[in-house]
Image: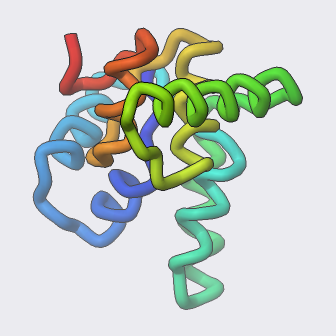
Amino acid sequence: MVIVDTTVWIDFLKGRATAPVAKLEALLAEETDIFTTGLIVQEVLSGIKTNDERVNVRKELERFIVVMPTIGTHVEAADIFDACRKKGYTIRSAVDCLIAALALEYDLTILEKDRDYTYISRVFPLKTFESP
């Protein structure tokens, strides 16, 4: 069970050949359960210039399992940010903290390419494809 970060989706949609994109392609071929959330969908769609493409991408993203944050998830995201800062790690994105909180809540592995998740995984038992 995997949640795919926005940056990986963007690279995938732009046809970039990266290790995370190759992993995403393999997960899709294996029909692995892939999860998303509203913020990821919002971020991905925000970068699409044409309405037709936006509609097509939205339809594709709607195929995946959607997990929605609760107030408790948002509180956990704030706790993640604070705990990382206290350990000397500056997390650049509140959205990454929220995605990490969802991953922890639903026991999901994050497919990502962002150092924020590396820092979070040093403080919390966050699973990524780079971490054990």
Q: Position of residue 84 (x, y in %)?
A: 47, 30
Q: Quadrant of the N terminus?
A: top left
Q: Position of residue 105 (x, y in %)?
A: 64, 14
Q: Residue at x 42, y 45 (%)?
A: 90
Q: Is residue 132 above or below residue 21?
A: above
Q: Position of residue 47 (x, y in %)?
A: 52, 78
Q: Is residue 106 above or below residue 84?
A: above
Q: Place residue 11 in its image quadrant.
A: bottom left
As rendered, which of 99 and 56 lies closer to the eye? 99
As rendered, which of 42 and 61 lies closer to the eye? 42
Q: Residue at x 66, y 61 (%)?
A: 42
Left or right: 77 as drawn, with respect to 19: right
As rendered, which of 29 and 73 lies closer to the eye? 73
Q: Is residue 121 above or below residue 55?
A: above
Q: Place residue 35 in its image quadrant.
A: top right
Asked whether residue 32 appears in the rendered view, the answer is no
Asked whether residue 65 appears in the rendered view, the answer is yes
Q: Residue at x 19, y 26 (%)?
A: 130
Q: Position of residue 78 (x, y in %)?
A: 69, 34
Q: Is residue 98 above or below residue 14?
A: above
